[in-house]
Amino acid sequence: MNEVGLKICKEEINDLITYIEQLSQLDKKTIEYYRVIAKQTLFFKHILNAYPQTYFVEVLISDFFNFILNDINESTRYLYLNERSIIENYIRLILKKDEYISHITSQSFVDLKEQNRLVLNESEYSKIMNEYKISCSYIHGGNILANHLVANFEECVNGVNDITKRNKANRMNQTLDLFKILNKLFIINNLEVVDNSFHRNKYALNYLLGKQYSLLS
């Protein structure tokens, strides 16, 4: 079952990458970037198959697909909207608190750090916070409103320009680091869910997320 499940996963990922390559001419690094995100998506499809009523897993899968599409189309604002949604839905699935079903707040991040203080180091926490702040800044154009309309508008313009100038290779690396951290936290806080979803398919789990994550489950 393990080898069959692994073969099916590889075929599904390769089929998606082949389809994506038909949409746009992409360099090798970008293709491998999308391959990692595709693996993320298939990982959560396995979770959803085992737990079909998990709404925020459904949203995450949709976010990953749209994240790839918006990156291909260079729809930067929607890309960051997807990234923010991805972070928020990971947090909901990690914390599992009713008060965060509708809104993620600053307290959500405090709870995330406290609940995972033994496995989440300061550098990892800073990466989550930094990417979340960047995505929010791009969407909202900044958080601090001055008294003057000109100053308000100037802040929005400058905030968007600074983020737009991010080197794409660095952005991709930072995004992959972010997903690795969030995956680790998701698995640690959902061990039974992951084990039930991959209990006869550990090879597939290794392929989708890496051996380090299968050791956690």
Image: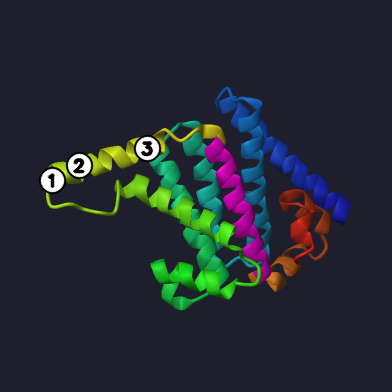
Where residue 12 sits in the image (x, y, percent)? 71, 42
Task: Find numbered disc 1 in the image and state the secondary structure of the residue it sits on.
Answer: helix
Quadrant location of residue 53?
bottom right
Taking 136 as reference, is 95 above or below it?
Answer: below
Identify the residue under disc 2.
Answer: 153
Residue 150 lies left or right of residue 75; in this view the side is left
Q: CA–CA distance between discs 2 and 1?
A: 6 Å
Residue at image x 41%, y 49%? 135
Label at residue 162: 3
Badge 2, how many Cα within 10 Å: few under 14, some, many 20+? some
Where residue 192 sits in the image (x, y, percent)? 71, 73
Start and end of the magenta stretch? Answer: 170-188
Where residue 35 sits in the image (x, y, percent)? 66, 39
Q: Are marks 2 and 1 in contact (CB under 8 Å)?
A: yes
Badge 1, how many Cα within 10 Å: few under 14, some, many 20+? few
Residue 201 lies left or right of residue 138; in this view the side is right
Most common SS among magenta residues: helix
Residue sitting nearer the eye, 23 or 112: 112
Identify the residue under disc 1.
Answer: 149
Residue type pointed to by label 1: Leu
Label at residue 85: none
